[in-house]
């Protein structure tokens, strides 16, 4: 079941495009990992640029999309490789 949920999340967040490139964040490799444990999802994002100003919006959109999937109650977003990763993660996962 969790593999199906992982695939559903991946499909849902694949519609999110990098605003600068106009390409799916999944295709660009920004989505590093998706795991599901019960009704909890964890999505790891790594922007292509450590100063990317759009990663906060991308992370917020990914959280909303993941939590819209039936069977997912809460999604935790982990941003890695960004100059402000700790602050972004704290803000997104309140």
Image: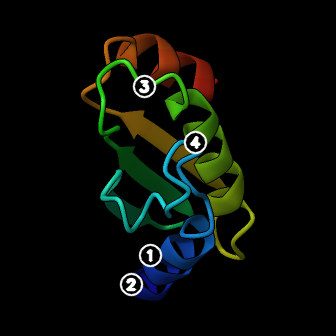
SS label for mark 4: helix
Q: What mark, if any, has residue 52 been given in the picture? A: 3
In this view, the residue in front, 50 or 79, is 50
Foreground mark, 1 or 3? 3
Circle 1 is placed at which residue position?
6
Q: What is the quadrant of the C terminus in the image?
A: top right
In this view, the residue in front, 61 or 2, is 61
The answer for how far apart the CA atoms under marks 1 and 4 are is 18 Å
Residue at image coords 35%, 47%: 44
Residue at image coords 38%, 84%: 3
Foreground mark, 1 or 4? 4
Q: Residues within 10 Å of mark 2 (few under 14, many from 20)?
A: few
Circle 4 is placed at which residue position?
58
Circle 2 is placed at which residue position?
3
- The reply to whether dot 2 and dot 1 touch (C-beta < 8 Å) is yes
Foreground mark, 3 or 4? 3
The answer for how far apart the CA atoms under marks 4 and 2 are is 23 Å
Indicate left or right for 68 with 7 as reference: right
The answer for how far apart the CA atoms under marks 1 and 3 are is 26 Å
Residue at image coords 30%, 58%: 29
């Amino acid at each position: 079941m969790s593999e199906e949920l992982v695939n559903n999340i991946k499909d849902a967040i694949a519609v999110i495009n990098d605003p600068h490139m106009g390409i799916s964040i999944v295709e660009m490799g920004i989505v590093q990992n998706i795991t599901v444990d019960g009704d909890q999802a964890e999505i790891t994002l790594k922007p292509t640029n450590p100063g990317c100003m759009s990663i906060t919006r991308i992370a917020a959109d990914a959280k909303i999309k993941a939590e819209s999937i039936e069977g997912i109650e809460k999604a935790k977003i982990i941003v890695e490789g960004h100059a402000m990763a700790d602050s972004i993660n704290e803000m997104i996962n309140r």
